[in-house]
Image (spheres, rainbow, N blue to C red):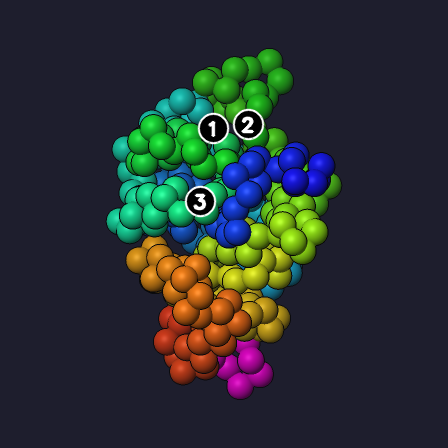
Amino acid sequence: MSVQAAALPAMKTNPKFIFFTDFDGTITLQDSNDFMTDNIGYGREKRRQGNLDTLEGKITFRDSFREMMDSVTSPYSECIQYLIDNIKLDPHFTEFFQWSLANNIPIVVLSSGMEPIIKALLKALVGPDADKMEVIGNYVKARPGKSIDDEDGWDIEFRHPESGFGHDKSVALRQYSSLPADIRPTMFYAGDGVSDLSAARETDLLFAKKGHDLISYCARENVPFTVFEDWSSILEKCKEIVAGNATVQDAAREGYEAYKGGAAGVKPMANGAAN
């Protein structure tokens, strides 16, 4: 194994495939950050407008997300418990996860959310095996003179504060895509929204969630993708590819055809964009 590969946790077992995935709204049915913002922050209408402005390039994801999190002032421990009580796992994710473990396909969670929340939710929703997933996200810090468990006491600390994404997921992905060809694994990625724009071009096969913003972006920017509704469809497609019965190119072609046919949950437009 090369020195470069040895430094990457997901390469320890010399996998032929790695599955990278967003967390919120992808592994889970709800986006935990949206859920907090909508219910104990400044509300859905303002949050959704920020999503659309990000998609259209009017504001960076980093700045929009900071505004969302600044509107949530509950102590951090209360936020985590609130999410554990309300966020649900995609009902098919556990089956996919167990299949990935059995077939030496590491799962790496790349999130624009905060690592402590993601790890707490995974532990509650998946169980002790959750520790077998690497989680790469943003951090949390106390505001000056406060504890994170004080009212209005915590602040998001971005992994890549200089980036308009806050956490530029392409940085981690390129560490794997740049490996020598003889050891480079096939790279999958699943996502749903504006936090996944930095990852969209970086993997061999992008799974974009039906009816969500990531499909609109991919169609507009001509980024190949395939559509998924839940993790059962991801599992089915990955099994075909791992068994050699389909290629990532086949899957991406099917995804774009589904989009053009109106089966991706967004309306195709004449100029190739979507709404």
Quick check: can you spot residue 144?
A: yes
The N terminus, quarter of image: top right
Q: Tell me if residue 178 comes above or below residue 204 in the rendering.
A: above
| Residue at image mark 3 | 104
Which segment did they paint magenta? 268-275
| Residue at image mark 1 | 116
At x 50%, y 24%, the residue is 152
Spatial distance from mark 3 to mark 1, Cα to Cα? 26 Å
Magenta portion: prevailing SS class: loop
Q: Earlier in the sequence, mark 2 or mark 1?
A: 1
Query: Mark 2 and 1 residues: CB-CB less than 8 Å, in contact?
Result: yes
Q: Earlier in the sequence, mark 3 or mark 2?
A: 3
Q: Tell me if residue 26 comes above or below residue 253 in the rendering.
A: above
Nearest to the eye among marks 2 and 1: give it: 1
Give the camera-side residue of 228 and 213.
228
At x 44%, y 66%, the residue is 244
Q: Residues within 10 Å of mark 2 (few under 14, many from 20)?
A: some
Q: Percent position (x, y) of residue 184?
A: 62, 52
